[in-house]
Amino acid sequence: MAEAPGRIRPLSADKGYDADWLRADLRKSGITPVIPGKRGRKRRIRHNKRRYRERWRIEATFNRLKDFRRIATRYDKLARNYASAAALTAIVAFWC
């Protein structure tokens, strides 16, 4: 059965978000942090490497959309105009 939309289970982030207080807050909210520990950490942190490797898709998608100046700088004043521009940009970016 599919999960309810809007419910976050695992949250992937890079080493810049490695903080004990952040991990504790995420766990309190029922979210599993998938964040590798920083190199100089005294206690090693275990994380799901398979899930962590999948986060490149999200980063690549945002980087591809930011190639379009209108999306990167957000010239539109209204949210609906920006959303429609983002939708058109996504179509163009992934169609070509």
Image (cartoon, rainbow, N blue to C red):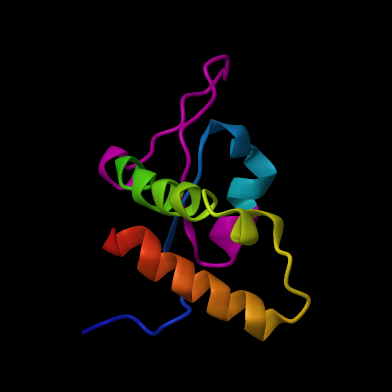
Quadrant where the C terminus lies?
Answer: bottom left
94 or 8: which is nearer to us? Answer: 94
State whether residue 24 is above or below residue 15.
below
State whether residue 16 is above or below residue 87.
above
Q: Residue at x 63, y 60 (%)?
A: 70
User: Can residue 45 be found in the magenta stretch?
Assistant: yes
Q: Residue at x 35, y 50 (%)?
A: 57
88 or 37: which is nearer to us? Answer: 88
Mainly helix, strand or loop, the magenta region?
loop
Residue at the outermost top position = 40
State whether residue 44 is above or below residue 77.
above
Residue at the outermost left position = 1
Q: Is residue 42 left or right of residue 79?
A: left
Quarter of the image where one finds residue 29 = bottom right
Residue 7, image x and y in percent?
Answer: 46, 76
Quadrant where the N terminus lies?
Answer: bottom left
42 or 48: which is nearer to us? Answer: 48
Q: Residue at x 54, y 54 (%)?
A: 68
Quarter of the image where one finds residue 40 = top right
Residues in magenta, as a range: 25-51
Residue 21, image x and y in percent?
Answer: 69, 45
Quarter of the image where one finds residue 41 = top right
Q: Is residue 11 visible?
A: yes
Residue 58, image x and y in percent?
Answer: 41, 53
Residue 64, image x and y in percent?
Answer: 44, 50
Residue at the outermost right position = 77
54 or 19: which is nearer to us? Answer: 54
User: Can residue 80 be found in the magenta stretch?
Assistant: no
Q: Residue at x 46, y 24 (%)?
A: 44
